[in-house]
């Protein structure tokens, strides 16, 4: 169910967060569903439980999950299918914008592209 790329530059805890958001976007997880316990997920993925705990903390800080003592972690209603897809798209956009900036794309060039898209244009050059 969860896919971790150990060769990726993306930290494992971020990959876990992205996996949970993605699974919610396709309807595998629904609001109120219980997430796998930290130790169980860590064992399945072959990683340190602290890494899974960090991912769960990050998701909880963003309001995507909530935890109750002795019961576990549950998906909040913030991650409905539509909002989960929006989160995935926003994260991909942020990463693409960071990469474009690192490769020397100016703010003005990025703004021109965005304005063209919002005006309904298809020209991205």
Image (tube, helix red, strand yellow):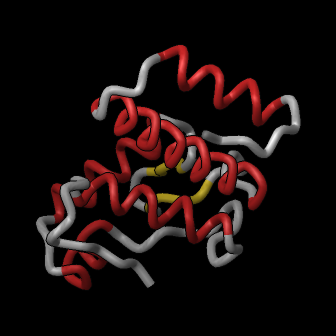
Q: Nearer the viewer, residue 19 or 95?
A: 95
Q: Nearer the viewer, residue 19 or 106?
A: 106
Task: Please give left or right for residue 9 compared with residue 3 in the image.
Answer: left
Q: Nearer the viewer, residue 21 or 111?
A: 111
**Which quarter of the rendered picture does the N terminus lie within?**
bottom left
Residue at 61% x, 20% y: name it: 111
**What count of labels does the image hold?**
0
| Location of residue 4 with respect to 12 vertically, above or below | below
Give the percent coordinates (x, y) of residue 29.
63, 71
Give the percent coordinates (x, y) of residue 14.
32, 52
Residue at 72% x, 49% y: name it: 83
**Which quarter of the rendered picture does the C terminus lie within?**
top right
Give the percent coordinates (x, y) of residue 9.
19, 56
Q: Nearer the viewer, residue 116 or 7?
A: 116
Task: Single out the residue that lies furthest toward the right.
Answer: 120
> Which quadrant holds residue 6?
bottom left
Residue at 30% x, 34% y: name it: 103
Give the percent coordinates (x, y) of residue 65.
54, 50
| Location of residue 41 with respect to 10 vertically, above or below | below
> Which quadrant holds residue 8?
bottom left
Task: Please give left or right for residue 124 compared with residue 20 in the image.
Answer: right
Task: Please give left or right for residue 61 compared with residue 103 in the image.
Answer: right
| Location of residue 13 with respect to 61 vertically, above or below | below
Residue at 41% x, 74% y: name it: 36
Task: Single out the residue that lies furthest toward the top.
Answer: 108
């Amino acid at each position: 169910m969860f896919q971790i790329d150990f060769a990726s530059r993306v930290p494992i805890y971020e990959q876990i967060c992205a996996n949970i958001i993605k699974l919610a976007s396709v309807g595998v997880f629904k609001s109120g569903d219980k997430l796998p316990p930290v130790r169980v997920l860590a064992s399945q993925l072959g990683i340190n439980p602290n890494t899974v705990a960090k991912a769960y903390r990050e998701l909880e800080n963003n309001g995507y999950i909530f935890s109750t003592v002795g019961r576990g972690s549950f998906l909040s209603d913030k991650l409905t299918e539509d909002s989960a897809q929006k989160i995935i798209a926003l994260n991909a956009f942020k990463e693409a914008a960071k990469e474009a900036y690192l490769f020397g794309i100016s703010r003005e060039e990025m703004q021109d592209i965005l304005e063209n898209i919002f005006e309904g244009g298809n020209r991205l050059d």
